Amino acid sequence: MNKNGRSPLHNILLLLLGLLVGSGLGLYIGWVAWPTEFTNADPTLLDESYRRDIVLMTASVYAADGNLIIARQRIASLGENGEEFLLAVLVDEILRAENETTIRQLVNLAADLGLSSPAMAPYLAPTPERVP
């Protein structure tokens, strides 16, 4: 027993109870009452894997809707080197050779944006030859 008539075990239990109540209250406030909301994150600040996902999703959406203006804006949102990054993702996908649909979507997007790479040639649709 100490001066205030409480045993050390009682003080430890009160301390643990205070920590549990404080932690629970902190979690409730941080996750339920006032959670942090991230909106309008700048894609240039994202990790490379997330930027890669943006490129792949942009190519997929472009293949579905054909809206080149929106696709160009999405690629431009990746920063000054957005088109270079698109080509880097394209070449990486070609080298990995895992999903031909994804490769064709990336090739079509890059070609429609006016980009070119020798690696794209096998995936571009051949132009019809004129018969004399």
Image (tube, grey):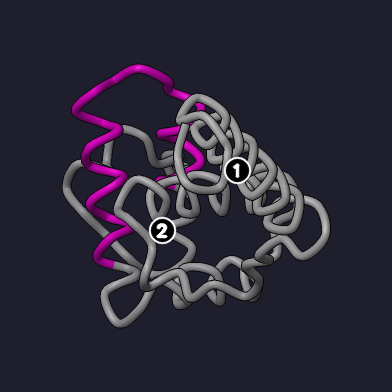
Residue 50, visible in the rendered structure: yes
- Residue sitting at 54 percent across and 72 percent down? 41
Residue 85, numbered circle = none
- Residue holding disc 1: 60
Q: Residues within 10 Å of mark 1 (few under 14, many from 20)?
A: some
Residue 91: x and y in percent read 22, 42
The one nearer the camera, 50 or 121, is 50
Three-letter code, disc 1: Ser
Residue 111, numbered circle = 2
Residue 121: x and y in percent read 27, 41
Three-letter code, disc 2: Ala
The image quadrant of residue 20 is top right
Q: Residues within 10 Å of mark 2 (few under 14, many from 20)?
A: some
The one nearer the camera, 2 or 22, is 2
Label 1's element?
helix
The one nearer the camera, 26 or 101, is 26
Rendered view: 65 above or below 75: above
CB under 8 Å between discs 1 and 2 = no
Decide whether residue 19 is among the magenta residues: no
Label 2's element?
helix
Q: CA distance from mark 1 to mark 2?
A: 14 Å
The magenta segment is: 84-107
The one nearer the camera, 79 or 18, is 18
Decide whether residue 91 is among the magenta residues: yes
- Residue sitting at 48 percent across and 44 percent down? 56
Q: Is residue 19 left or right of residue 131?
A: right
